[in-house]
Amino acid sequence: MSSSVPAIEAEALVKIYHENSAHPVRALDELSLQVRQGEIFGLLGQNGAGKTTFLRVLTTLTRATAGHARLLGLDVARKGLEVRQRICAVLQENAVELFLSVEDNLQTYGRFHSLRRGEISRRSDQVIEQFGLGSNRKQKVIDLSGGLKRRLQVAKVLMVDKPVVFLDEATTGMDPISKRATLDTLREQARQGRTILLTTHILEEAEELCDRIAIIDRGRLVAVGDPNSIKSYGSAAVDIRVTYGALPQEAIARLSRFPHTRLEQRHTTLEICIDANRVSPFDVLAEIAKIGSVVSFEVSSGTLEDAFVELLGKGRRERSGDQ
Amino acid sequence: MRMILAVMYREYLIRTTTLTWAFYDLFIPVTYLLLFGLGLDRAVGSGLSIAGKQVGYNAFFLPGVLAMASFGIAINTSYGFFVDRDNGIFYEFLTYPMTRGEFLIGKILFNCLLSVVQAMITVTLAALFLQIPIQWAFTSLLLAGVVIGTSGWFFCLTTFALRIRRNDMFNTFLNVAYFVLMFASSMFYPLQGLPPWLQVVAWANPLTWHCDVLRFITIGVGSMGTVIVEALAFNLFLIVSFAGAVHTLRRGVLG
């Protein structure tokens, strides 16, 4: 497959659930985007934004109402089997065989993906070690913790070498060490040329891991680009964090005069997020210095979360304006 | 073929890792026959007269037990869709590199194999311990009847399992269906003695067709003409159920 062919391509994709009912749900609304081969692509959005529906269309679990979706150039609606031969998916639920052991879970997964017997054993040993599941090898999955089940679910993806991997909130429920190991593994997989499309609610994770990110809202694409450009899409957000020796009473009132998107107090620390296009950070810093004795301060550009909130709000304002 | 084998292997692993299921699958029918059948056999005493032939209750009940076993395996297998759906593995399966047909066929082939083993155990133990006069010459026909019965009920119940999305609703549906289908059939008693309205219901019940065909094959009781019509009707039921299950899996579940 030529690397110039996009790994995933969606054109004006529409999915309407309960189409013939009194309350149809438009889960995807003319969504168009491309994912290049070998990239880690993050799909962000609130609950009900359409992320899982998009994944369900691409993994042949549901058919789009209109528009086209292609995976490595194959139409997902017409070439379902060929598409499934090129993908593996970790879906939102803990998709594991509860009554089978960890080892049997991995081995049946290998069988379903046509691995030879020797290869199945070799890979399952390797994956069990890589994901620290050695002591649970013979244990039935029903007896494992939620985090371990999730780890096993992600581990299955490494049993096979499919070019496109779908991960729907794959690290949910994992402890920080497992999560770190999983992210490192995914990065390594992408370096080896696999395309990874993931959805997550954890924006720091997306920022750290993804080459590009798309934000969708109510089935529509709001923004797409690398994490840094996404941050700049929303607004010129600047975060200022200041810690006073003792927090003056009037501090919040004085800072709230500046246009801000967030102003929070934690003990003697204040955090304010401002839009640099509307107010100069230097003016805010000057005011901070006048308020009282500053122990420490920190200025940083806005986070992905700030941009996310801003972009979603902006998108909705524009849409309600259109109507 | 490789995918069908993979589905069968997965079914095998699940059944063998849980001993209670293995016991239920293989020995419940014979236990039913030995306890319930034996008790009723003693109560009925001189047996039943069917189409001018005197038959002991145990012999009469054996084909009913075989039909019940096919029905039971079909229930367990179709209920498996709910277990898989609750675990989340059902949707993952549908992203594996196989067709929807391979998925269904793999599931039913293993369970047909199971029903064949179960039928052989039941019939052998019935002949050994209850001295039921089995027509051994028709063993292959008997096994074909068991396979067709299990498949028909599996595809029929699969259609409902895939359409009814709630576990509790499917459970209720199964309990009602099981109760009505079993007692409005020739599984436990001959239809001749039933009230006319219940006879009409029973004659329209595929479980009656299955029981009658198995009864004719196993112990040679029944009218050949009626049994041929019932066998044809059950095969039609199987074909319609298969078409319904595949259609539902393609459209109903996948949206």
Image (spheres, grey):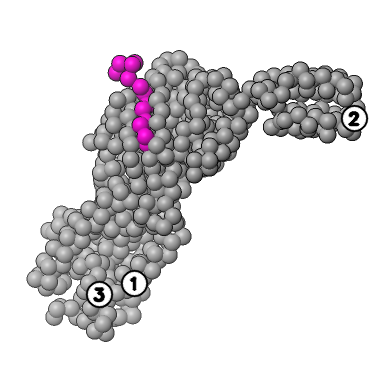
Query: On screen, A6 above or below B32?
Result: above
What residue is drawn where x is 41% and y is 28%?
A33
Inter-mark Cα distance, 1 to 2: 78 Å
Where residue B129 sits: x, y (%)? 29, 64
Q: Which circle's residue, 3 or 1, is located before the other in the chain?
A: 1
Where residue A223 sits: x, y (%)? 50, 28
Query: On screen, A79 above or below A35?
Result: below
Let me know if residue A284 appears in the view.
yes
Is residue A207 found inside the magenta-colored segment of the image? Answer: no
- Quarter of the image where one finds residue A317: top right
What residue is drawn where x is 85% and y is 20%?
A289
Query: On screen, A112 above or below B243?
Result: above
Count numbered badges in the picture. Answer: 3
Inter-mark Cα distance, 3 to 1: 10 Å
Q: Magenta stretch?
A: A1-13
Residue B55 falls left or right of residue A87: left
* Residue named by callout 3: B202
Chain that bears disc 2 = A
* Residue named by callout 2: A248
